[in-house]
Amino acid sequence: MNVPIKLPVLLAAAGLDSLHALSRLLPYLQGVAADEARTILREAP
């Protein structure tokens, strides 16, 4: 991503008030390697 997006903007777009809502879910999710995450984000519509 060539345009930096501030984390509060992403949270607001997702309808979240804080990262706490996400941190509670992390133990139940499988991790993603940085390379794979980068590819997924670049290929997303």
Image (cartoon, rainbow, N blue to C red):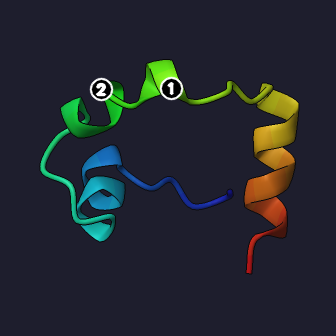
Comparing 24 with 45, the one in front is 24
Comparing 4 with 21, the one in front is 21
Q: In the picture, which quadrant includes the C terminus?
A: bottom right
The residue type indicated by label 1 comes to Tyr
The residue type indicated by label 2 comes to Arg
Judge whether 44 appears above or below 18 on screen: below
Q: Which mark is residue 40?
A: none
Which residue in the structure is indicated by mark 2?
24
Q: Secondary structure at mark 1?
A: helix
> On the rendered structure, is 31 left or right of 22?
right
Q: Residue furthest left?
A: 17
> x%, y% of residue 4?
51, 53
> x%, y% of residue 31?
68, 24
User: Which mark is in front, 1 or 2?
Assistant: 1
Q: In the picture, which quadrant includes the N terminus?
A: bottom right
> On the rendered structure, is 27 left or right of 35?
left
> x%, y% of residue 40?
80, 55
Comparing 33 with 26, the one in front is 26
Which residue in the structure is indicated by mark 1?
28
The number of discs equals 2
CA–CA distance in space, label 1 to label 2? 9 Å
Other residues around mark 2 within 10 Å, as few (<14) / some (14–19) / many (≥20):
few
